[in-house]
Image (spheres, rainbow, N blue to C red):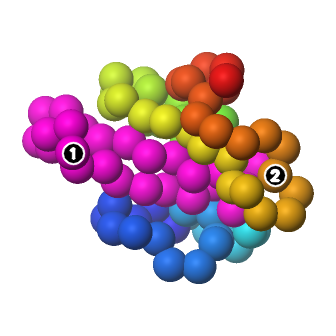
Amino acid sequence: MIGLGLEPSGSVCSRAGCREASAWRIEWRNPKIHDESRRKIWLACTEHVDFLREFLAARDFPLDVIADDGPGAATTGPVDAMGRA
């Protein structure tokens, strides 16, 4: 479930109702209420990373999508809102 932006516990996707293991970390902020030092974190499975990224990008929230370095990670390092490295 989408949380309150606190450091997520475990490695379960943040998409409501999803119980899959996360493969992605989405770090974002709402610039209207948070300065640049404040970042919220959502975790995403491969199926929901695009949904969560698009949800935030549609609101013009600055974000970084970072692949987990754990098993099954497709890439490492930040990617932009369109998924490009």
Tag 2 secondary structure: loop
Along the viewing direction, whichever of 17 and 76 lies nearer the viewer: 76
Circle 1: residue type? Ser
Residue positioned 75% across, 68% down in the render: 20
- Is residue 11 at least partly visible in the picture? yes
Asked if the magenta segment contains residue 33, the reply would be yes
| Residue 73: image tag | 2
Badge 2: residue crowd in 10 Å (few <14, some 14–19, many ≥20): some
Residue positioned 33% across, 67% down in the render: 6
Circle 2: residue type? Ala
Q: Quadrant of the C terminus?
A: top right
**Where is residue 57 shown, x and y percent of the image?**
44, 27
| Residue 37: image tag | 1
Height in image: 61 above or below 51? above
Height in image: 12 above or below 82? below
**Where is residue 10 shown, x and y percent of the image?**
59, 79
Boundaries of the magenta span: 22-49
Chief SS of the magenta region: loop
Query: What is the tally of numbered marks visible in this picture?
Result: 2
Residue positioned 21% across, 37% down in the render: 36
Badge 1: residue crowd in 10 Å (few <14, some 14–19, many ≥20): few
Residue positioned 57% across, 52% down in the render: 25
**Where is residue 41 shown, x and y percent of the image?**
43, 56
